[in-house]
């Protein structure tokens, strides 16, 4: 399983955490997403998922919810 950590800017409450989590879980290839305040998201995906493409999709999903994200770490 691959994991990517995102720095998420713009979250300020538990409602934000819920919306960001739902957005990340809605991306194809995501197994699970965990989001926490103040600015962290950890997403797990299948090993056969193209990492670069899914990071782009995760960032776009969060952007559509009004948050800014950047990759913090990938493994």
Image: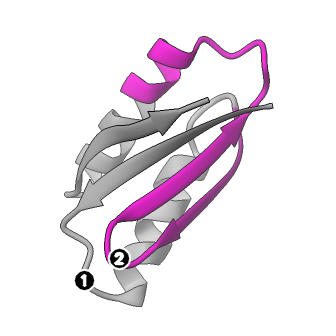
> Which residue is denoted by mark 2 in the rendering?
16
**Mark sitting on residue 12:** 1
Badge 1 crowding class, 10 Å Cα cut-off, few under 14, some 14 to 19, many 20 or more, is few
| Magenta residues (range) | 30-56
- 56 with respect to 11 (left or right): right
Q: Give the percent coordinates (x, y) of residue 18.
A: 49, 75
User: Residue drawn at (51%, 23%), measured in percent from left and top?
Assistant: 54
Helix, strand or loop status at disc 1: loop
Mark 2 surroundings: few (<14), some (14-19) or many (≥20) residues within 10 A: some
Q: Is residue 8 above or below residue 49?
A: below
| Closer to us: 51 or 17 | 51
Examine the rendered structure and indicate whether residue 30 appears above or below residue 66. above
- Front tag of 1 and 2: 1
**Marks 1/2: CA distance?**
6 Å
* Image mark for residue 73: none
Residue 74 coordinates in the image, percent (x, y): 53, 31
Question: What is the total number of numbered labels drawn onto the structure image?
Answer: 2
Q: Nearer the viewer, residue 74 or 24?
A: 74
Label 1 with label 2: CB-CB less than 8 Å = yes
């Amino acid at each position: 399983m691959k994991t990517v950590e995102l720095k998420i800017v713009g979250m300020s409450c538990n409602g934000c955490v819920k919306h960001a989590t739902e957005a990340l879980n809605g991306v194809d290839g995501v197994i699970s997403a965990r989001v926490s305040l103040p600015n962290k998201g950890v997403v797990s995906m299948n090993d056969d998922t193209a990492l670069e493409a899914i990071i782009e999709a995760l960032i776009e999903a969060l952007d559509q919810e009004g948050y800014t994200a950047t990759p913090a770490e990938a493994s």
